[in-house]
Amino acid sequence: MEQMRYGHIRGLGLTVPCQMTDSETVKIASGRFVSRNTSTGKGEIADTTDTIMGWVDADDYNSAGTATTSSSTYPMYYDFGDVFSIPLAYDNSSYTVNYSQAIFFELCDLYVASSVQYADPTNYSTGQLMIVGGQAATGTTICTSDGYLEVCIGAEQRLTLGVGA
């Protein structure tokens, strides 16, 4: 199967510089949503329960990923209307919700495995992402080359970021 390309696909595309913490793994075949380290204010690749502040447009185009350094700064998309393509977590076993029009505009969470961010429409607890499109997976193994969701950052995510948060 051909490797899919994930990233910013439409929207205003407004960005601000985002300095990353050391040793974050940024992979092109992944979501690249970031959260804020509350001690340093630097960006970190978001995990399943993190509050998302944006999407970094890293210049890494290999499958192994790039480890960030304290001087790594990437443009970060932050607009509510920006839409991103991200791999879909679907295996018809533990992750049973595939893309269809029935989940259009629903909220979902991130699923992170081996430093790869997937959209997880099966599980919902934080509502990190809002589904606005996609393509159904055809296989029964979670992978970065079969199925994707088009998502926006959930509004609640950004509204919870505050001074001292």
Image (cartoon, helix red, strand yellow):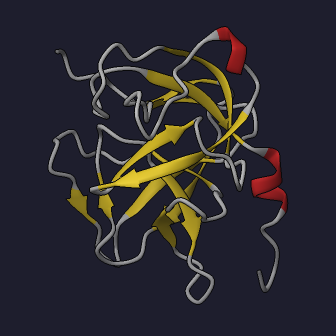
In the picture, measured across the screen, residue 27 lies left or right of residue 136, that is left
Q: Furthest-bottom residue in view?
A: 39
User: Nearest the camera: 76 or 7?
Assistant: 7
User: Which quadrant would the N terminus be assigned to in this image?
Assistant: top left
In the picture, measured across the screen, residue 37 lies left or right of residue 11, that is left
Residue 147 spot, x, y in % from top left: 40, 20
In the picture, measured across the screen, residue 142 lies left or right of residue 151, that is left
User: Which quadrant would the C terminus be assigned to in this image?
Assistant: bottom right
Q: Residue at x 21, y 52 (%)?
A: 65
Residue 95 spot, x, y in % from top left: 47, 37
Q: Residue at x 39, y 17 (%)?
A: 137
Seen in the picture, residue 83 relative to 77 is either above or below; the reply is above
Q: Residue at x 27, y 30 (%)?
A: 141
Seen in the picture, residue 89 relative to 64 is either above or below; the reply is above
Seen in the picture, residue 87 relative to 41 is either above or below; the reply is above
Q: Furthest-front residue in view?
A: 93
Residue 92 spot, x, y in % from top left: 41, 27
Residue 120 spot, x, y in % from top left: 53, 40
